[in-house]
Image: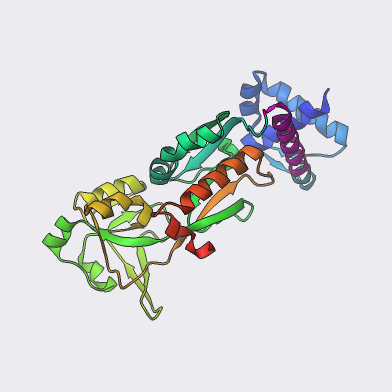
Amino acid sequence: MDRMRLMETFVRVVETGNFSAVAREARTTQSAVSKQVQALEALLGVRLLVRSSRSHSLTEAGQLYYERCRQVLDTLEEARIEVHRAEHEIGGVLRVAAPVAFGRLHIVPRLQAFYDRYPKIKVNLQLDDGFVDLVAAGIDVTFRVGELKDSRLIARRIGTAHRATLASPAYLEKHGEPQHPDELLQHNCLVYTGLANINEWIYLDAADKLHMVRVDGNFQSNSSEAIRQAVCEGLGISYSPVWTVGDDLRVGRVKSILTRFRPPPLPLNVVFQPARRPSLKINSFVNYFSDAFSRDPDIAQMLTANA
């Protein structure tokens, strides 16, 4: 049997986590996929997977072989793109993931200009404020705000997301404007549940003294869009990235408060699959958006840390 086909099957089994998913992709049977992996093991003379009734895991040799196979397949894919593209044209489907608000506000509005430059790239954009498993979901690149917990990921930091404490004029008129973080204990705080330590709001004052407040309120959400709308509706006070409310700040729908105290910034990264070298289309996408962000007044301030 063709060794390249066996390698491709093995890689997909590892990345999807099960034989049945690969069988559906290849329109074959689970037994046939299992036999291909067994044939590869026989060819190599080593055990690649440890199988149980419900799952499988990589052996040490299997992990090493998977990483080498992934590199080989990525190199072949890049060679295929280079051979078949027209001069300076890059094509293919690019699967991108991003937080909902970031994708809506800062990726989608820039896609037309991106397509003008790379007309043969097709973008499949998945927006989700929750954790996205790049390998299982088949994502090429994702934007992530916050510290990365998985050290296996390949990341490129493209900026820093500065946060602000926000409230609507109507809320402040009714409940008053806090002047110190401790006064947040007397206010209804809108909690975004997508980050660790969700109800701990941290500030640094002008002397870099740390102030931590355990806030509470009657509304929580895992959607930054919902938190933004709740602030605009006057439901309470939020602790949010500035880029989620740029237009709202400019027209006065919301106001930045506690400005003498600054929340610690969050890193903004683009993240690639582990053991996978970014392809030409990925690099083109990332470089284009990094350059576009550097000229955006709402996002340019995220790049000051890297200037």
Name the side, left or right, on which 244 lies relative to 89: left
Asked if 81 appears above or below 278 in the picture, the reply is above
Q: Nearer the viewer, residue 272 or 33?
A: 272
Residue furthest to the left in view is 174
Q: Using the rendered view, name the quadrant where residue 259 is placed.
A: bottom left
Magenta span = 65-86
Q: Residue at x 47, y 50 (%)?
A: 293
| Residue 127 visible in the shown view | no
Q: Check the picture and name the quadrant holding the N terminus.
A: top right
Residue furthest to the front in view is 87
Q: Nearer the viewer, residue 169 or 284?
A: 284
- Tag count: 0
The dominant secondary structure in magenta is: helix
Percent x, y for residue 187? 21, 64
| Residue 187 visible in the shown view | yes
Q: Which residue is drawn at 72% across and 21% down?
A: 32
Percent x, y for residue 266? 46, 60
Asked if 60 appears above or below 256 in the picture, the reply is above
Q: Residue at x 73, y 39 (%)?
A: 70
Percent x, y for residue 273? 62, 44
In the image, residue 103 lies in the stretch drawn in magenta: no
Q: Using the rendered view, name the quadrant where residue 264 is placed.
A: bottom left
Percent x, y for residue 296? 42, 51
Q: How is the image coloured?
A: rainbow
Asked if 211 appears above or below 56 in the picture, the reply is below
In the image, residue 82 lies in the stretch drawn in magenta: yes
